[in-house]
């Protein structure tokens, strides 16, 4: 089975621009989470979606938004890019439990490396 | 909210020696615990997880970890490391109702010949 896929693999943008990152979960997985990993740090949680609804949000500004589509793929959008947004953006998928207890192991994609100049 | 502290940012070790990577967590509720490994320019790969049951958890590549509730620790161990184990290792915690993971800052394991 294919794992989590992300596109593009690398991206270079300038300050003030907008970017869209894409993620396709493992087949059968209904939950997608997004993380930002700045060089030298651990991943920081941005969003989690389940069945097209937002289930969790980290401490990120409103410039960051996301959505999940009926096929469970997801997009992360970042507006008005800042130099500090340069990072590896990771997508993780999990089977999803509908929020009723239990937790799902998260499986990560290879990430999208975003460089903001 | 939960948080994770990885006490060592870098751990150098010789090939075939044992290694322990330390992880402590903070939480007011019950949690699930995970160890992930990240090779250069790659995403994270799950090594092992503790959800319930036996506190000694065995994972892939010969790694194991022990959950210690009283010390709020989840240290990762391997009795004999290989050059190929050189990577960065992340400890993570998740609450039982959400899929929001909190990661530590990572430990770089450098295995020397």
Image (cartoon, coloured by chain):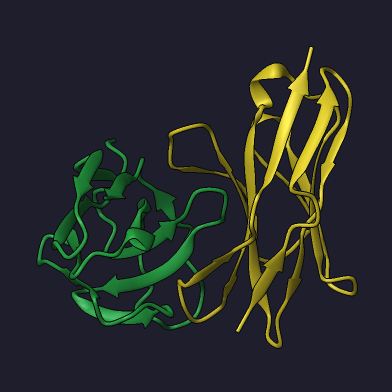
Question: B3 above or below A27?
Answer: below
The mark total stands at 0
Image quarter of residue B27: bottom right
Identity of the residue drawn at 31% across and 66% down: A31
In the displayed structure image, the side of residue B80 where residue A29 appears, left or right: left
Residue A38 appears in the figure: yes
- Where does the C terminus of chain B fall, quadrant-wise? top right
> Toward the viewer: B30 or B35?
B35
Image quarter of residue B25: bottom right
Q: Which color is chain B depicted in?
A: yellow
Question: A104 above or below A98?
Answer: above
Residue farthest to the bottom?
B28
Q: Position of residue A103 (x, y in %)?
A: 50, 70
> Toward the viewer: A68 or A7?
A7
Q: Position of residue B52 (x, y in %)?
A: 69, 66
Residue B55 appears in the figure: no
Identity of the residue drawn at 67% across and 41% down: B59
Q: Position of residue A10 (x, y in %)?
A: 25, 39
In the displayed structure image, the side of residue B72 where residue B96 appears, left or right: left
Identity of the residue drawn at 17% across and 65% down: A16
In the displayed structure image, the side of residue B66 where residue B37 appears, left or right: left
Question: A109 above or below A93?
Answer: above
Residue farthest to the left?
A70
- Where does the N terminus of chain B fall, quadrant-wise? bottom right
> Toward the viewer: B32 or B72?
B72
In the displayed structure image, the side of residue A88 where residue A68 appears, left or right: left
Among the chains, which one is green?
Answer: A
Q: Position of residue B55 (x, y in %)?
A: 80, 59
> Toward the viewer: A80 or B23?
A80
Image quarter of residue B92: bottom right
């Amino acid at each position: 089975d294919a794992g989590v896929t992300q596109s593009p693999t690398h991206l270079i943008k300038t300050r003030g621009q907008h970017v869209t990152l894409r993620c396709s979960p493992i087949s059968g997985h209904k939950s997608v989470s997004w993380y930002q990993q700045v060089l030298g740090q651990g991943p920081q949680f941005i969003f989690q979606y389940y069945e097209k609804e937002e289930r969790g949000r980290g401490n990120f500004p409103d410039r960051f938004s996301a959505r999940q589509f009926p096929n469970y793929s997801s997009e992360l959008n970042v507006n008005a890019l800042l130099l500090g947004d340069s990072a590896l953006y990771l997508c993780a998928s999990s089977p999803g439990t509908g929020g009723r207890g239990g937790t799902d192991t998260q499986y990560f994609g290879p990430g999208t490396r975003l460089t903001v100049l | 909210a939960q948080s994770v502290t990885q006490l060592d940012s870098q751990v150098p070790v010789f090939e075939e020696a044992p290694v322990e990577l330390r992880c402590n967590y903070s939480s007011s509720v019950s949690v699930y615990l995970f160890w992930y490994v990240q090779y250069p320019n790659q995403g994270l790969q799950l090594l092992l997880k503790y959800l319930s049951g036996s506190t000694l958890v065995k994972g892939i590549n010969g790694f194991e970890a022990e959950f210690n509730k009283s010390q709020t620790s989840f240290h990762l161990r391997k009795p004999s490391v290989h050059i190929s184990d050189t990577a960065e290792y992340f400890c993570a915690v998740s609450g039982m109702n959400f899929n929001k993971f909190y990661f530590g800052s990572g430990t770089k394991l450098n295995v020397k010949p």
